[in-house]
Amino acid sequence: MEDNNYRHEDFDNCFLCKHPVLKHILTGLLVFLGAFAAFYVVTDWHFKRMMDPVSQMRRIDKAIMQREKSFDKMERRALKAQERYDRKAFNAQERMERTVSGFAHVEKTPDSYKIVINLRPFDNDEKNVEVKTDGNTVVINAAGEKNKHNKKEIIRFSQAFNFGEDIDTDNITKIRQGDDYIINVPID
């Protein structure tokens, strides 16, 4: 049968037809060279793209943006932590001021200052309250013990009252009225 002028006799002297192992080896070699060429081309494209300054800048910009996002996130966390800390500190300061105002307060009359100290936290004993003077400043130190839930707590209170006017530190009087210890500081 002769299609397209093909004759089988023309190929009987084919070298590869007589050596099929060599035919397989050469086919494998051609496949390997084709795969190597394809790998080389793809690697070359990738390397050129990787070394392209525009691509480099995009990657650097992306890395910078990621760093900025992470720094922003860290900063927000730090601000939230600082706000929580400030809130706790403010609440502690407010509690302490309420507690301090529960221990002592000052009243001014036309001729003197009255410092009223609540003695209940200090074992209801005026001996636990010490009054010192230094110029126009009156310093009060007090201490007491408190049993709370089978634990002993020591309460210490120290407050300095600085009066802008001249006071007569030699004529300071101390009086106990119920649970209050009243220190009367006359004005010169």
Image (cartoon, rainbow, N blue to C red):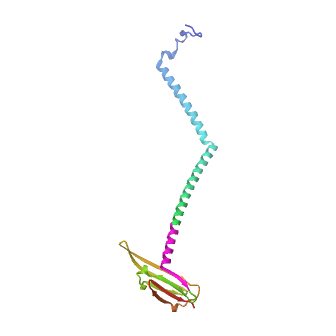
Q: Is residue 39 above or below residue 109?
A: above
Q: Nearer the viewer, residue 165 or 116?
A: 116
Q: Position of residue 177 (x, y in %)?
A: 45, 86
Percent across and percent down for residue 50 are: 59, 41
Stretch in magenta: 88-108
Q: Residue at x 61, y 48 (%)?
A: 61
* Percent position of residue 57, x then y: 62, 46
Report the number of numbered marks.
0
Q: Residue at x 49, y 73 (%)?
A: 96
- In front: 104, or 128? 104
| Residue at 58 percent of width and 39 percent of height | 47
Seen from this angle, which residue lies furthest front? 178
Answer with the quarter of the image where residue 121 lies: bottom left
Give the quarter of the figure containing the C terminus. bottom right
Q: What residue is drawn where x is 57% and y is 55%? A: 72
In the rendered image, which quarter contains the N terminus?
Answer: top right
